[in-house]
Image: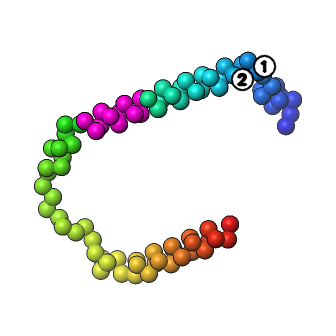
């Protein structure tokens, strides 16, 4: 670390507190905006219309469409489990 690096992080405590407070205010504002957007989505009148659209397909794919996939995914899951146990 150089003197220039230290000069950027060596700030008065009052400035640091002000920056943290500003970030906290921004975080709370963004959280409130996100919650309001989710509330608006929950009351979306088009959700009911969308749910009523006809769906003609019953299955998108079957195991026969991807031979060997079940064995491959099982192997990947086993490798993942083994890797997590060795950490």
Please name the residue shown 13% across and 50% down the image. 52
The one of 57 and 17 positioned closer to us in this rendering: 17
Q: CA distance from mark 1 to mark 2?
A: 6 Å
Residue 77, image x and y in percent? Answer: 51, 73
- Give yes or no for residue 42 being in the magenta stretch: yes
Q: Quadrant of the C terminus?
A: bottom right
Residue 15, image x and y in percent? Answer: 72, 19
Please name the residue shown 19% across and 37% down the image. 45
Left or right, 87 with respect to 69, comes to right
Residue 80, image x and y in percent? Answer: 56, 70
Left or right, 17 with respect to 54, comes to right
Say which mark, if any, is on residue 68.
none
The one of 75 and 66 positioned closer to us in this rendering: 75
Please name the residue shown 41% across and 33% down the image. 34
Q: Quadrant of the N terminus?
A: top right
Q: Quadrant of residue 37?
A: top left
The one of 49 and 24 positioned closer to us in this rendering: 24
Dominant secondary structure (helix, strand or loop) of the stretch shown in magenta: helix
Query: On screen, 30 above or below 50?
Result: above
Say which mark, if any, is on residue 12.
1
Say which mark, if any, is on residue 16.
2
The span shown in magenta is 33-43
Query: On screen, 28 above or below 59?
Result: above
- Give yes or no for residue 12 being in the magenta stretch: no
Residue 79, image x and y in percent? Answer: 57, 74
């Amino acid at each position: 670390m150089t003197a220039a690096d230290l000069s950027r992080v060596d700030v008065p405590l009052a400035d640091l507190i002000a920056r943290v407070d500003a970030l906290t205010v921004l975080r709370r504002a963004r959280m409130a905006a996100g919650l309001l957007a989710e509330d608006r989505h929950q009351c979306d009148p088009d959700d009911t219309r969308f749910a009523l659209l006809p769906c003609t397909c019953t299955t998108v794919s079957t195991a026969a469409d991807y031979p060997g996939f079940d064995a491959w995914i099982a192997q990947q899951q086993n490798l993942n489990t083994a890797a997590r146990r060795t950490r």
